[in-house]
Image (cartoon, rainbow, N blue to C red):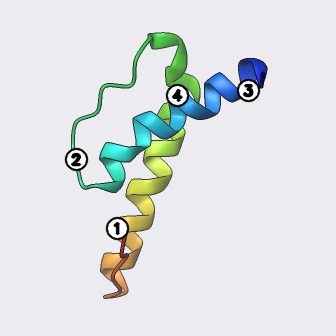
Amino acid sequence: MLGKEGVKAADLTASLMPVFSGADYILYGPVEGCEYVFPAVFTVNTSYRYAARMKETIEI
């Protein structure tokens, strides 16, 4: 129903859930998905590092 963009969004969400939970290792699926999974994981990790530097907590 949502086409390729819907599949990409679902794949990205499934790949980021372990990162939100604190995992250091993720299985992101086919290598074709790396072009949007890697930047998203980097963004989440950078946000956590910035929050830690500012002594803030991120609650899930």
| Closer-to-camera residue (38/2) | 2
Query: Which percent across, then down, holds residue 33?
Result: 53, 20
Measure how far apart labels 3 and 2 are at the Cα level: 26 Å
| Mark 3 vs 2, N-terminal side | 3
Q: Judging from the image, what secondary structure is the residue with disc 1 in?
A: helix
| Closer-to-camera residue (13/45) | 13
- Residue under circle 4? 11
Q: Are the residues flagged by discs 1 and 2 in contact, CB closer than 8 Å?
A: no
Q: Are the residues flagged by discs 3 and 2 in contact, CB closer than 8 Å?
A: no
Q: Which mark is residue 23?
A: 2
Measure how far apart labels 1 and 3 are at the Cα level: 29 Å
Mark 3 belongs to which amino acid?
Glu
Relative to 28, 21 lies left or right = left
Q: Residue 49 carries which label?
A: 1
Q: Quadrant of the N terminus?
A: top right
Q: Residue at coordinates 22% horizontally, 36% vertically from top-left? A: 25
Q: Judging from the image, what secondary structure is the residue with disc 2 in?
A: loop
* 9 versus 50 height, above or below: above
Q: Residue 5 carries which label?
A: 3
| Mark 4 vs 2, N-terminal side | 4
Q: Judging from the image, what secondary structure is the residue with disc 4 in?
A: helix
**Label 3: how many residues lie within 10 Å, few (<14), some (14-19) or many (20+)?**
few
